[in-house]
Image (spheres, rainbow, N blue to C red):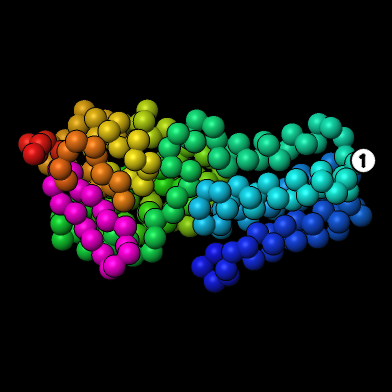
């Protein structure tokens, strides 16, 4: 949605759809149930937003507008826990320290195989796969590999599995999972996560395997290679596990 419509049209459309759903569902369902379903629609629409703040605005806009207008005065107090629960399901608190659903841009990993060649059938992990944009980009770059995704949020994990049926997508904590056995681990995290990621890769992964990070470098370590696409594209920093640090 965000690729074709300028901001704030995606938010206005999502809020309008939630309002229409709420108004229509009240004819057949209790107000609390109508609220829950309308909030679920708004939260689902937030996944199509670009950037964490815009997603938050899309998800929170409908319930906030109900409060400000006083339209839902008859809704029981406990029902207001529904929007919060939905947000926590999609954006769990323990995942907020990591990248909050930053999708990999289309074509961002084209040319990666030339810098980090992998044998056919090599296992590759997208750590924090979200909705699957990174897995899709990895498949374009490494069509012969076995792709795996790991995502903490179970709704995102389910949606990612639907988008990427050719990948094995599991729910789990990327920091608790074992990265051993993967020929390449791909990340699109925060800058402050990269030192931790490099340390984990150095412990878990076999010498000769690769850690790939979109946009953010490992502090204090020179990358072994860097993929730079077109002007304005995010770089992909590559680190060979077991290679001497510069």
Is residue 148 visible in the rendered image? The answer is no
Q: Is residue 137 above or below residue 93?
A: below
Taking the spot 17% from the left edge, 38% from the top edge, the residue there is 221
Q: Quadrant of residue 231?
A: bottom left
- In the image, taking residue 194 as reference, residue 224 lies left or right, namely left
Q: Quadrant of residue 136?
A: bottom left
Residue that numbered label 1 is attached to: 74
Location of the N terminus by quadrant is bottom right
Q: Position of residue 121 (x, y in %)?
A: 23, 52
Residue 100 belongs to the span the image colors magenta: no
Q: Quadrant of residue 138?
A: bottom left
Is residue 28 visible in the rendered image? The answer is yes
Taking the spot 65% from the left edge, 59% from the top edge, the residue there is 11
Q: Is residue 169 above or below residue 105?
A: above
Q: Which residues are magenta?
A: 224-240
Q: Nearer the viewer, residue 113 or 15?
A: 15
Secondary structure under tag 1 reads loop
Q: Position of residue 243 (x, y in %)?
A: 9, 39
Taking the spot 36% from the left edge, 30% from the top edge, the residue there is 175
Q: Nearer the viewer, residue 232 or 148?
A: 232
Q: Position of residue 108 (x, y in %)?
A: 32, 61
Q: Position of residue 232 (x, y in %)?
A: 32, 64
Location of the C terminus by quadrant is top left
Q: Residues within 10 Å of mark 1 (few under 14, many from 20)?
A: few
Q: Nearer the viewer, residue 98 or 85?
A: 98
Taking the spot 88% from the left edge, 48% from the top edge, the residue there is 71
Residue 232 belongs to the span the image colors magenta: yes
């Amino acid at each position: 949605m965000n690729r074709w419509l300028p901001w704030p049209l995606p938010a206005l459309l999502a809020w309008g759809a939630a309002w229409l759903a709420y108004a229509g569902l009240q004819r057949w369902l209790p107000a609390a149930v109508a609220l829950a379903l309308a909030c679920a629609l708004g939260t689902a629409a937030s996944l199509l937003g670009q950037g964490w703040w815009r997603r938050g605005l899309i998800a929170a806009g409908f319930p906030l507008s109900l409060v400000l207008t006083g339209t839902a005065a008859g809704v029981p107090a406990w029902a207001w826990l529904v929007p919060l629960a939905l947000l926590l399901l999609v954006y769990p608190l323990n995942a907020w320290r990591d990248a909050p659903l930053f999708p990999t841009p289309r074509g961002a990993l084209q040319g990666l195989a030339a810098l980090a060649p992998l044998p056919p059938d090599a296992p590759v992990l997208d750590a924090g796969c979200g909705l699957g944009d990174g897995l899709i980009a990895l498949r374009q770059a490494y069509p012969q590999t076995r792709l795996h995704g790991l995502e903490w949020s179970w709704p995102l994990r389910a949606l990612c599995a639907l988008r990427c049926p050719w990948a094995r997508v599991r729910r789990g904590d990327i920091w608790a999972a074992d990265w051993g056995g993967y020929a390449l681990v791909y990340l699109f995290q925060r800058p402050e996560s990269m030192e931790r990621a490099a340390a984990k890769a150095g412990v878990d992964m076999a010498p000769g395997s690769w850690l790939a990070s979109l946009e953010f470098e490992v502090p204090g370590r020179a990358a072994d290679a860097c993929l730079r696409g077109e002007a304005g594209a995010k770089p992909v920093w590559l680190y060979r596990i077991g290679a001497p640090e510069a």
